[in-house]
Image (cartoon, rainbow, N blue to C red):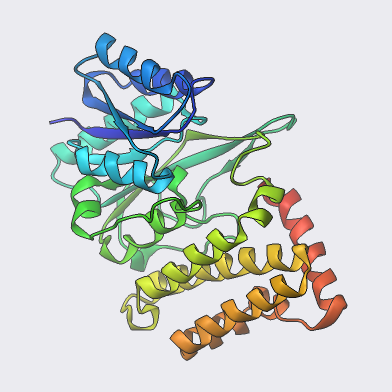
């Protein structure tokens, strides 16, 4: 059995997918690379099949009708045979040295009978034209180099959210928790990392810069103007996350608080872009989102609304909207997103 399955969702990725595949090949025979061609019209399928022929014991090429990023991840997970599962987007890549360190650590943990449900490592914003690369680590938030539980986690800074880039889930856990990402929808990575969290009992954090997260293409889903145009999909994802768990019923206080923090971030992101768009329709959608949360779980609504971000998202009038935009621009400089 393979140690790690890495799935690469591809849609018209011919210009850059080789780099993602090549860096993962450094993991050798213990890695299974599933390249999912999601109905591409360029040479994506051809490139994937060439790698599968060249590395038949490592690379698998799967083609499907276009279903979006989430459906490609679903396909990868359904076909995964590795003990652990990671998603690597086709324009991103992994650091080869860090991958070997992670693989060696996972092997050692498995040999000792202590393999965690969730393995975490750092990711790096590979932003075009950035003079300095922003590294997101979990120092002061998570214990290092040992197995730990939710009750042992510490304080997460605003920049330290657990994202798809930093996660390696146990494959069996993902399949067992029934996760299934929606078709033709962007930003499903939030569901991927959020929904399985209550099923996670043990974790391990390694302070290495494994994942390289490329930001810079004009058509990229995290581009600010693209996010504004696709705000309805962001709203859809946020509502799915609201419905995915009864957060107030989660027994672990630290897990519950972390998930509330993450959901607060999603509410904030949605609200910020609706405010930045500025039309009456967008402002009405923002109000609808907060009403949706309120009607679904009034206690959770009050909890999120009482936080600083929640309060700022609901300041009235043009002054309130200006405060939101200033805060967003400051956060963008600090954390390096978009």
User: Residue 26's x, y, as percent?
Assistant: 35, 18
Question: Residue lying furthest right in this view?
Answer: 319
- Residue at point 34%, 65% (across, down): 150
| In the image: residue 245, left or right of residue 299 | left
Would residue 13 be visible to someone looking at this image? yes
Question: Residue lying furthest top in this view?
Answer: 54
Q: Quadrant of residue 121?
A: top left
Towards the viewer: 234 or 87: 234
**Rendered position, 115 above or below 276:** above
Towards the viewer: 181 or 326: 181
| In the image: residue 113, left or right of residue 289 | left
Towards the viewer: 66 or 36: 66
- Residue at point 41%, 72% (across, down): 254
Position of the N terminus, as image quadrant, is: top left
- Residue at point 33%, 83% (across, down): 249
| In the image: residue 338, left or right of residue 60 | right
- Residue at point 66%, 69% (across, down): 271
Q: How many marks?
A: 0
**Rendered position, 159 above or below 154:** above
User: Residue 307's x, y, as percent?
Assistant: 62, 79
User: Residue 317's x, y, as percent?
Assistant: 83, 81
| In the image: residue 15, left or right of residue 181 | right
Q: Quadrant of residue 321?
A: bottom right
Towards the viewer: 44 or 252: 44
Would residue 262 be visible to someone looking at this image? no
User: Residue 112's x, y, as percent?
Assistant: 15, 41
């Amino acid at each position: 059995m393979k140690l790690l399955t890495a799935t690469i969702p591809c849609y018209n990725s011919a210009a850059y997918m080789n780099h993602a595949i090549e860096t993962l090949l450094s993991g050798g025979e213990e890695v299974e690379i599933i390249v999912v061609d999601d109905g591409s019209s360029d040479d994506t399928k051809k490139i994937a099949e060439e790698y599968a022929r060249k590395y038949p014991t490592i690379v698998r090429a799967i083609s499907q009708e276009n279903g979006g990023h989430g459906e490609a991840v679903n396909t990868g997970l359904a076909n995964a045979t590795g003990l652990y599962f990671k998603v690597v987007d086709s324009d991103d890549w992994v650091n080869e040295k860090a991958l070997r360190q992670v693989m060696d650590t996972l092997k050692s943990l498995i040999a000792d009978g202590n393999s965690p449900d969730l393995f975490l490592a750092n990711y790096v914003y590979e932003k075009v034209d950035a003079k300095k690369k922003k590294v997101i680590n979990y120092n002061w938030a998570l214990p290092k180099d040992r197995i730990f539980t939710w009750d042992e986690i510490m304080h997460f800074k605003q920049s330290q959210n657990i994202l798809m880039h930093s996660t390696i889930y146990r494959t069996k856990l993902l399949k067992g928790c029934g996760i299934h990402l929606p078709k033709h929808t962007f930003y499903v990575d939030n569901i991927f990392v959020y929904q399985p969290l209550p099923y996670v009992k043990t974790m391990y954090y390694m302070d290495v810069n494994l994942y390289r997260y490329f930001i810079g293409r004009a058509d990229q889903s995290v581009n600010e103007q693209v996010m504004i145009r696709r705000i309805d999909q962001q709203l859809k994802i946020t509502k799915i996350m609201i419905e995915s768990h009864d957060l107030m019923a989660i027994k672990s206080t630290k897990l519950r608080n972390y998930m509330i923090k993450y959901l607060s971030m999603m509410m904030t992101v949605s609200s910020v872009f609706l405010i930045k768009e500025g039309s009456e329709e967008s402002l009405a959608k923002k109000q609808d989102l907060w009403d949706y949360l309120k009607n679904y779980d009034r206690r959770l609504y009050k909890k999120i609304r009482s936080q600083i971000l929640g309060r700022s998202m609901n300041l009235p009038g043009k002054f309130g909207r200006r405060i939101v935009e200033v805060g967003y621009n400051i956060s963008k400089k600090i954390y390096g997103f978009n």
